Image (tube, rainbow, N blue to C red):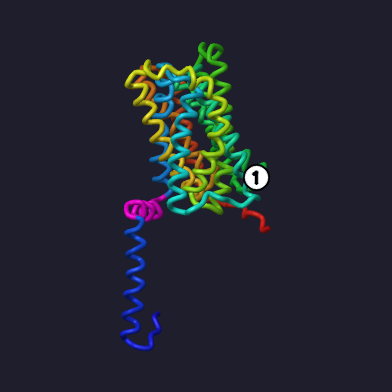
Amino acid sequence: MLSCESTSACTVTFLTEASQKSKATSAGGVGYRFRSRLARTPAELILVVTVLLWSGSYTSTRYAVTHGFEPIAFSSLRFAIGTVIFVAVVLIREGSIRIERRDLLYLVPAALIGVVINQVSFTYSISLATAATVALIFGTLPIFTSILTRILGWEQLTRRHWVATGVSFAGVALVALGVGGQLSADLGGVLLALLASASFAAFSVFSGRLMQSYSAYRVSALVVLVGAVPLLLISSPQVARLDWTGLDPLAWAAFAYIVFMFITTTYLWFIAVDRVGAAQGTLWANLQPFLGALVAVVILSEGLGLFQILGGVVIAISIVLGRIRRQPVPAPIE
């Protein structure tokens, strides 16, 4: 309730506050309205949009790396572009990308494991195995995430959640059966896909910890920046020998989609993980393997066997089972 000495004083106070709010809104423009709507958007809807965008990454990446792009060069270039955009946005909005020194404990693993190791393993797995196989193997993501959060003691997971991760693992087992005779030929790709899944789990867990203290923009910028530097160094020989003129328009289109997807989903994923927790968020992420497999069938004409279809159904069931209320463990007070 307002307390004013006079009606005119109340009027001046009201007009001043309204003017300040109007200036803040107009200053943010579209970005302000977007953030306001996003804050009111259910986390589940954010996760669904994120997963839908993710589901096309397997096919797009596989097409690009089999039509001219070198695997690591492909990843490092999109991270370089993402770094410039994220850092620019944070500097404009917040004026700094600095974090407390103690938070390097979370930033470094998120960047080195979740960016460098993840991108190397993911892009090579896509070049060695079919997109459908790699997409469905990512069904192990909630298992790795749950194990990591349990070891670190950062989330208290219920028995129902562990049942859901077990069901998810059963779905992945069905996928492996569906690979059949191709399993030995694709063994390297399968193992690299598992490493990519485990490293993304680390990315989600450690980044989620950073989200407790910083904005999604700042966390995105820092993780991408720290991870992009070693990734660019590793990929420099591939970038140097890349035949830019030999890339066909569809390969460039695939690259453009991956850049758009990467920037959009990185920001949305951090917001969703901050709201529901890494363990539950990765159960939702398990929608992407099945959707990714379907995209691969439609666009790349890859085969999808009965066991792979059943595996996708079982993974979807695990998502339903895992819809539990988050029980976070508070960060220690320093």
Q: How many other residues sit within 10 Å of disc 1, few (<14), some (14-19) or many (≥20)?
A: few
Q: Nearer the viewer, residue 47 or 126?
A: 126
Question: Magenta segment: does it hold 97?
Answer: no
Residue at image position (38%, 40%) is 49
Residue 45 in the image, given as x and y percentages of width and height:
39, 45
Q: Is residue 305 visible?
A: no
Residue at image position (63%, 54%) is 331
Residue 113 in the image, given as x and y percentages of width and height:
60, 34
Which residue reaches farthest bottom? 5
Q: Which residues are magenta?
A: 29-42
Q: Is residue 43 visible?
A: yes
Q: Quadrant of residue 312?
A: top left
Left or right: residue 279 versus residue 295 is right
Q: Nearer the viewer, residue 95 or 106?
A: 95
Figure check: 41 above or below 199 = below
Residue at image position (66%, 47%) is 153
Secondary structure under badge 1?
Answer: helix
Residue 82 in the image, given as x and y percentages of width and height:
45, 37
Question: Magenta segment: does it hold 41?
Answer: yes
Residue 307 in the image, given as x and y percentages of width and height:
46, 21
Which residue reaches farthest front? 240
Q: Nearer the viewer, residue 285 or 310?
A: 285
Q: Quadrant of the N terminus?
A: bottom left
Residue at image position (46%, 36%) is 317
Main SS type for the magenta part? helix
Q: Quadrant of the C terminus?
A: bottom right
Q: Nearer the viewer, residue 159 or 212?
A: 212
Residue under numbered circle 1 = 105
The kind of residue tagged 1 is Leu
